[in-house]
Image: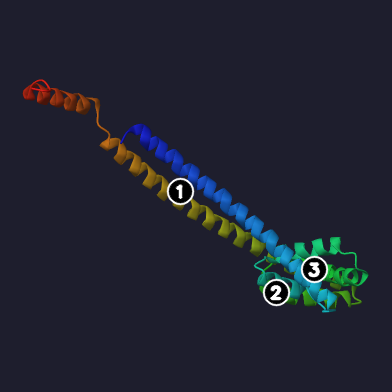
Amino acid sequence: MTVGWSTTFMIAFYSLTIVTAIVYLSLMTFQRRVNMKKMMENVSGKLAAHVTLSAKDVVNLGRGFGLSPKSSGDAIYRLYAGTHDPISFDALKVLVSEIEKEEAFDELPDEVKPSLSRIVKLVDNSNDPSDKHILLPITTTLLKYVELKAEQEKVKKQTYRAYVITVISFVVGASSFYLTLKTPSQDDIKKAIQEVLIERSANGPVGK
C-alpha cells in the first residue's frame, strides 16, 4: 500500500458519494413527475365520470400517489392549464379556486387548516366589515410558531449532517492514517534490498 493509493481511494470514495447523491435526487425528481402524471390521469378520469372533487380530495389523492400537498396542487394546475373540455374546465376552475383558498394556510399546521378554512367561509358570509380581519392575529401567531418550528428542524438536520460528515471523515482519515503507517519507509526499502543482496551473496552466483 502506498500514499498515492490511499489518496486515490479517498478521491474515489468522495466521488462515489457525490454521484450516488446526484443519482438519488434525479430518481426522486423523475418519480415525482411520473406520480404527478398518474394523478392527473386519475383526476381526469374522475371528472369524466362527473365525480365532484374538493381540495381535501386532491390532497388525499396525492398521498395515494406519494405526492406532497404542494405537488398535488401543481398537478391540478397543470391539468387545469391543459384541458380543453368545457365541462372539465369548469369543474377544475372551481377546484383551483378551493385550492387557492387552502394555499393561504399552506405553511400552517395541518390540524388547524380545516378550522381556518371554516372561519374564512363564515367571514365571507358576514356583513360586519371588521370580521374581514379576524384571522390576521391568528395567522400571524401561527406563522411565528411555524417559523420557529422550521428553524428547529433546520438546526436538527444541520446537526445530523455534520455528525454524518464527521463520522465519514473520521473513517476515511483513520483508513488513510493506517495505510500511511503500513507504507514502507525509505529505510525499510533500503534494509529489504540489503537483505536480498546479502542473501544472494550467501547463496553464490545463480546457476552454481
Q: Earlier in the sequence, mark 2 or mark 3?
A: 2
Circle 3 is placed at which residue position? 99
Quarter holding the N terminus is: top left
Residue bearing the label numbered 2:
60
Q: CA distance from mark 2 to mark 3?
A: 13 Å
Choose top left, top right, bottom left or bottom right for residue 65: bottom right
Q: Nearer the viewer, residue 45 or 130?
A: 45
* Amino acid type of the residue tagged 1 in the rendering: Ile
Badge 2 marks a residue whose secondary structure is helix
Residue 7: x, y in percent? 40, 35
Q: Would you identify the image quadrant in which residue 41 lies?
A: bottom right
The residue located at (73%, 76%) in the rendering is 114
- The colour scheme used here is rainbow
Q: What is the quadrant of the C terminus in the image? A: top left
Q: Is residue 116 visible?
A: no
Quarter of the view holding residue 190:
top left
Pick the front one: 47 or 197:
197
